[in-house]
Amino acid sequence: MDSSAQTMPAVTTLVRAAFLVDAVYAESAREHGLTQQQGQLLCVLMARPIGMRELGSMLRLAKSSLTGLVDRTERNGLIRREPDSKDQRAVRVSLTPRGRALVGPFYRDTCDRIERLTDTLDDAGRDALAALLGQVVERNHVPALFAGPGATASGPTAADPTGA
Amino acid sequence: MDSSAQTMPAVTTLVRAAFLVDAVYAESAREHGLTQQQGQLLCVLMARPIGMRELGSMLRLAKSSLTGLVDRTERNGLIRREPDSKDQRAVRVSLTPRGRALVGPFYRDTCDRIERLTDTLDDAGRDALAALLGQVVERNHVPALFAGPGATASGPTAADPTGA
DNA sequence: AGCGAGAGTTCGTACCACGAACCAGTCTCG
DNA sequence: CGAGACTGGTTCGTGGTACGAACTCTCGCT
């Protein structure tokens, strides 16, 4: 490490970048009348309805925590609990029309803001970053948070029911 | 870039990586008997005592939120409020011996865990990642969270009193 | 029929975050 | 010197977040 630019070790940059992304996410949510957690919940539901169990593993929440989050979000009229036709005890959580109407703009807006964080990078840099971080998240089994319905345009990243 | 590996856009990888780092940080804190917020607080205090105002801007907390966080952490015996010799109304928050004894291992352990997330990257990859993310955090004025006292070994990254 | 495992909820506790109102020092300017 | 204006911190009330333990009901299997 002799190049002048390289001051921080990877770990430090990761922590700070996480802090930054978090703050941007929270701010965006707030401006759309959401909490960060409720925003996240809506985003994962964009793709398809999901049961409490799988939801908990995606968001890394204990079941009791999730019950509360879903309660509050449901009370706000953004999501709905539907009975699961196959399993009498299970529940499928899905977006209400109002929730769907809200999450679209929120998702896009948030994407924009995050993208704007990488303003200084050129296309090659951004691609390199995506490749590196992609490898990290891939390798560490991060659930498919924030993979909108091709919101960034492209692929039918099919619903892959493999939970955690 | 059309190679098969490149599926996710940069934005997605950023959000997921942030989520990942967050989870690891929280888990590490928990195992050391801390909450994520209290851990973060201790980490920024590693470098030097800091007043409430600056602390708030570093952690991006409203002052009332910070009062509470400091209260709880102080009650746990990890930090202390000292009067500021120059300004009668101000306060300097500093680590107690117990806090210092706790934060060292916590910081190192957390660093290890984060670093382990990048296991699959070779040295070049990790350097590239550090450079790219470094540019992002630099450019977006992320405060000096998690810059331990050269805990990762190297430089005397002198106390730079330039707050947010 | 019975029984263990799984999906969700309830309950109690603690923490986190905020804005509004407030208080006590500090600063400025007449 | 003294009346504001300003600033560093705290208090208070509200609501969201997260957890573990205990519980209910259903499922699936024997």
Image: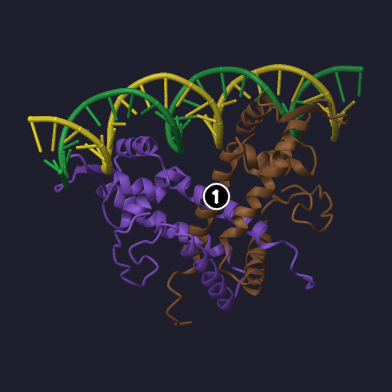
Chain colours: A purple, B brown, C yellow, D green
Residue B96 appears in the picture as rendered: no
Q: Report which quarter residue C21 is drawn in.
A: top right
Question: In the rendered view, does D18 fall on the left or right side of C15?
Answer: left
Residue wearing tag 1: B24
In the image, residue B133 sits, relative to residue B73, either above or below, namely below
Percent x, y of residue A136 = 52, 64
SS at mark 1? helix
Question: Taking B99 as reference, is A137 left or right?
Answer: left
Q: Position of residue D4 (x, y in %)?
A: 75, 25
Residue at (67% x, 39% y) in the render: B41
On screen, residue A10 versus residue C26, left or right, reads left
Q: How many marks?
A: 1
Q: Say if residue B1 shows up in the picture.
A: yes
Spot occupied by residue A101 in the image (x, y as percentages of width and height): 31, 52
Q: Residues within 10 Å of mark 1 (few under 14, many from 20)?
A: some
- In this rendered view, identify the residue nearer to me: B31 or B69: B31
Q: Amino acid at mark 1?
A: Val
Q: Does C13 appear above or below A62?
A: above
Using the image, determine if residue A40 lies above or below residue A71: below
- Of residues B31 and A2, the one drawn nearer to the viewer in this rendering: B31
Q: Chain of mark 1?
A: B
* Residue drawn at 35 percent across, 67 percent down: A150
x and y, in percent, of residue A119 in the image: 59, 68
Instruction: Say which of A75 and B129 sits in front.
Output: B129
